[in-house]
Amino acid sequence: MSTTQLTTCDVDEPQLNDRQRRFVAEYLVSLNGADAARRAGYAHAKVAAARLLKNPQVAAAIGNVRRNDLERLELTRERILQELACIALRDVADLCDEDGIIRINDLRQLPERVRRCVDSIKCKQHTDADGNISQSIELKLAPKNAAVELAMKHFGLLSDKQAANAVPIVRLSDLCPRPSKPNPVEQRILAVEQLATDQE
């Protein structure tokens, strides 16, 4: 049985005809109105899709199936925001052991909030000259900047227009506290940053 057939069974809306139910099922698979209308058998797919998506009964059917999916998957607003917070507020130090060294021998040893930020994992096996096998793990974390921007939009801290035009300026000297008298390296950093600020 295909994915579409399974989804069609979930569209239990007696006020819709068979073709409208098929449209709803196809739309929930692809989220493309014209494609869904074409697969549901409508001749003028774009026109039909625009009409169907404005139909209150079709819109209600789409909403009902989505709500049922969210309940079945336990995708609550709070849970999604928690996932977003894990990415936006993660601390790189959580990847380190007590000596400040990143060692990933067992993913289960990582804190859950860090594991939830992992976007992909690559494992490589290495064999040395003596035939000993070792493994290295490469973790790719979900983009933090995108999560911060999404969270700011959600809480009304950043409008779409501001997001498009904003170019965040982060100075290295702002990232970590420094003693009252900077060392020579810090003095150079401050001088470069001041020069860049003066040229703006």
Image (spheres, helix red, strand yellow):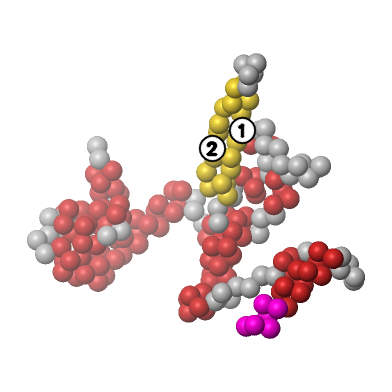
The residue segment tinted magenta is 195-200
Q: Which residue is mark 1?
A: 136
Q: Which residue is mark 2?
A: 122
Q: Name the secondary structure under disc 2.
A: strand
Question: Of label 2 and label 1, which has the lower sequence position?
Answer: 2
Task: State the image coordinates of residue 92 (x, y, percent, origin top left).
Answer: 69, 52
> Residue placed at 17% from the left, 66% from the top?
46
Between residues 118 and 131, which one lies in front from this camera angle? 131
Q: Residues within 10 Å of mark 2 (few under 14, many from 20)?
A: few
**In the rendered image, the vertical position of residue 136 relative to residue 153, given as above or below:** above
Task: State the image coordinates of residue 126 (x, y, percent, origin top left).
Answer: 59, 26
Q: CA distance from mark 2 to mark 1?
A: 8 Å
Label annotation for residue 156: none
> Residue placed at 53% from the left, 66% from the top?
150
> With 185 as the anchor, is 79 left or right in this view?
left
Q: Predominant secondary structure in magenta?
A: helix
Q: Name the secondary structure under disc 1.
A: strand
> With 79 as the anchor, is 193 left or right in this view?
right
Quadrant of the drawing holding the N terminus = top left
Figure quadrant of residue 136: top right
Between residues 88 and 195, which one lies in front from this camera angle? 195
**In the rendered image, the vertical position of residue 116 relative to residue 45, given as above or below:** above
**In the rendered image, the vertical position of residue 110 relative to residue 55, given as above or below:** above
